[in-house]
Image: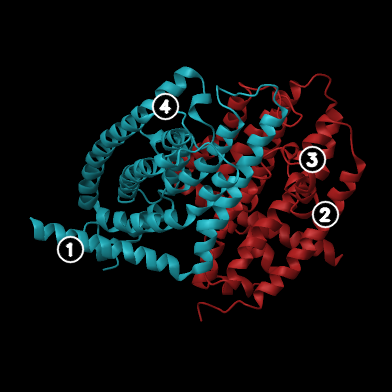
Chain colours: A red, B cyan
Amino acid sequence: MQFIQTIKKYFGLYQAFFKASLVADLEFRLNFILLVFAEFIWYSTQLVLYEVIYRHTNIIGNWTLNQMRVFVFLALFVDSIYMILWDPNFSKFNDEVRKGNLDLLLTKPINSMFMISSQKISISHIPCLFITGAGLIWSLMQIPDFNWLKLFWLILLIPSGLSVIFVGRLALNSSAIIFSRADFLQYVWYSIFRLGLRPDAIYSGTLRYILIFILPFAMVASVPTRFLLEPIQFGFALWALIMPILLLSFMNWYWKFCMKYYSSASS
Amino acid sequence: MKKSFIAFWRRNLAFSELAIVSNLEYRFNFVIDAFVQPLITVGIELLLWIAIFKTTEATLIGGFGKEAYLAYGVWAPFLGRIAVSWMYESMMVEEVSSGSINVILARPISFYEYYLSQMMGYKFITTVLSLLAPLSVSYFFHLPIHYDRIPLALLLVFYYLFLIHTLSFVISTFAFFLTRVRSLTLVKNLTLWLLAGELVPIDLMPETLSKILLLSPFPSGVYIPVAYMTGRVDINMISQGFLSVSISILVSCLIGHWLWKKGLEEYTGTGA
């Protein structure tokens, strides 16, 4: 019963956050339109990269152009969800720490990780979610004899991939609490995240295992794409279930660890 | 004349030094910026090109072999990071939006000059220190780099930075008229990133598109210097780069100057 109450409370909060973000984003309409446009440029660049390379080769890793399109659209679809839910909050995290705004968030009677990561929702990314989703469906239609029931695997695999992004970004940001200024860690994140925007087939040997089990960026889009396009590997399904629990437990510990170093900047 | 130039030089040198000192103050932050991030980016790009050549049947793509692309993969992200201005553009926009520009307006230095010298100081120190990374990777993997061409290529990138700074200046003047201009920075930088050829060598793109892009100044930030260092293009392309950047600087300076004047007419000095 208490669990349901808690869920209701967080859901209510999330609704309030959504409304506030919607009003805030639509207040500056030109800014909003340009943000949507910027996201389309960013997503186009990812597509352009492979479209140009496939003009000169038929296969990368072990994927053809059609298969690679499924991977790219799926990666961008997952990325859109992450951008909507968490990115604006993580982007301003360092400022919140430096200016002492974190104090206020820590005093709220709710989970501090939830508060710091979910206050702002990026409304400008919602159109991208629909476009990349449509792109994914279109790219799957290009695959001969695709079994559409396989899409149900995404219900498990997308949240699992999102947990990798959430924990990765929050862990890097939390490190900013330990080091008084670590703005560039944000840029490191964008570099590391490229690992997830490349198919796992380009990594070989130990590195590939690292990207599945230790820094599991392959779980963001590569492994889900394999579930859609190749025979199912149940070992990965089990890992997709266990991994988020491990990652979130680690994050919970690391957050508390970093908090020990937090000295209220506003006091 | 000579006296005023010396004053100008000293003033700008002081601001460059200020940028260098303030960036080196937070050493962890600087190490991440100058070494860790470029190495990660380079590593990922190398893996992509190695995988492409491992699986393709052809030994040449667009007329160039694996080593040429590895060299491109090493140097393009390195130069791409130099040829962009996120941090200083955000600071410039913030100054105008928040009204703290008052302090600069009251000083005997222009807003443009104040941030130009700081950005150049920061770019100089980051380039000098992080140059070690692509140089050592190129040496270790025996990549086909014409080492004697590096100084001229870097000179073009630094010249291109004048254009980048002028564009940042233009964007920051929009803050006089609009409440939020962050999206403009985002759109501009992403477009430049795509047009500069950091993502993929411009000569791999369809021929007509590639010709049009090469006429624009943007490949002078990444593609032209890297292509020159790796032997994909000759000195004529570098000259063309200098020329197109010069014309663009002139045009963007005129636009910036006009917007600045209009902006100051609109501006109400809050926070004074």
Which chain does tag 2 point to?
A
Q: Which residue is mark 1?
A: B108
Callout in the foreground (4, 1): 4
Q: In the rendered view, tell whether residue B66 sits above or below residue A208.
A: above
Residue type (three-letter) at the residue carrying disc 2: Met
Q: In the rendered view, tell whether residue B133 sits above or below residue A132.
A: below
> Around disc 3, counting alpha carbons within 10 Å, would you say few (fewer than 14), some (14 to 19), or many (20 or more)?
many
Residue A130 in the figure: left or right of residue B190 = right
Residue at image coords 48%, 43%? A32
Near-viewer residue (B140 or A165)? B140
Residue type (three-letter) at the residue carrying disc 4: Leu
In contact (CB < 8 Å): disc 3 and disc 1: no
Q: Which residue is mark 4?
A: B213
Residue A87 in the image: state x and y as whole percent: 60, 52
Callout in the foreground (4, 2): 4
In contact (CB < 8 Å): disc 1 and disc 2: no
Q: Which residue is mark 3?
A: A223
